[in-house]
Structure formats: C-alpha cells, structure tokens
Image: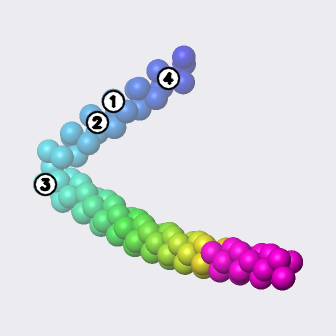
Amino acid sequence: MKNVVWFVLGIAGGFVLAHLVNKDPRGQEVLSEVDARISEFTDRIADAYREQEARITGLVDDAKDAAATAADAAADFMSDTAAAAKEAAKDAASKLAD
C-alpha cells in the first residue's frame, strides 16, 4: 500500500512539474521537442509493425498455397491410384472368368 501511495504521489508530482515547465516558453519548447521525438519513435514502431505484419501475411499466404497444391496433388494421386486399382481388379476378374 505504501508503494501505491508513492506511485500516485510521483504521478501527481510529474503533472505539477510538467504544468510549471509548460508555463515557461523555454519549457514549452523542450516539451514540444520531447513530444516530437515520442511521435517519431511511435511512427517508426508502427511502420516496423506494419512491415512485419505484411511479411508474416505473405508467409502465411505462401504456406496456404503450398498446402493447397500438396492437397491437390495428393487427391490426384489417390484418384489415379484408385482408378489403377479398379482397372487391375477388372483385369484380374476378367482373367479369372476366362
């Protein structure tokens, strides 16, 4: 509980100090510079996030395409194998009938 009180007092003190600094023209300049740097940092982080998201989305799309291609190839193989087995069974049945 004691730590929470110190935390709240620290936040309140920070707001009071920022208000006092903002009254001075030099303080306004410093605060606007800090704000510009924070905005630049957040913009860089957002750009990096979007770039990484696009990269991951591309990888996921490639994986989906590869899985679909593999599934199609497996289905074709199974269909061809079933047709060949059916044909072999017909041939065997016709040989037995002869």
**Residue 85 on the magenta segment:** yes
Report the mark closest to the observer, 1 or 3.
Answer: 1
The part of the chain drawn in magenta is 79-98
**How far is disc 4 from disc 1 in space, using C-alphas?**
12 Å
Instruction: Name the secondary structure under disc 3.
Output: helix
Residue drawn at 74 percent across, 77 percent down: 90
| Vertical comparison of 6 with 18: above or below | above
Residue position marked by numbered label 3 in the rendering: 25
Residue position marked by numbered label 1 in the rendering: 12
From the viewer's perspective, is 92 left or right of 69?
right
**How far is disc 2 from disc 4 in space, using C-alphas?**
17 Å
**Label 2 or label 4, whichever comes before in sequence order:** 4
Q: Which residue extends farthest front?
A: 98
What number is the disc on residue 63? none
Residue density around tag 4, few if under 14, some if 14–19, many if 20 or more, within 10 Å: few
**Residue 55 on the magenta segment:** no
Instruction: Name the secondary structure under disc 1.
Output: helix
Instruction: Name the secondary structure under disc 2.
Output: helix
> Which amino acid, by three-letter code, is at mark 2?
Phe
Pointers 2 and 1 in contact (CB under 8 A)? Answer: yes
Residue position marked by numbered label 2 in the rendering: 15
Report the mark closest to the observer, 2 or 3.
Answer: 2
Residue drawn at 71 percent across, 80 percent down: 87
Q: Where is residue 25 in the image (x, y as percent from the top left)?
A: 13, 54
Residue position marked by numbered label 4 in the rendering: 4
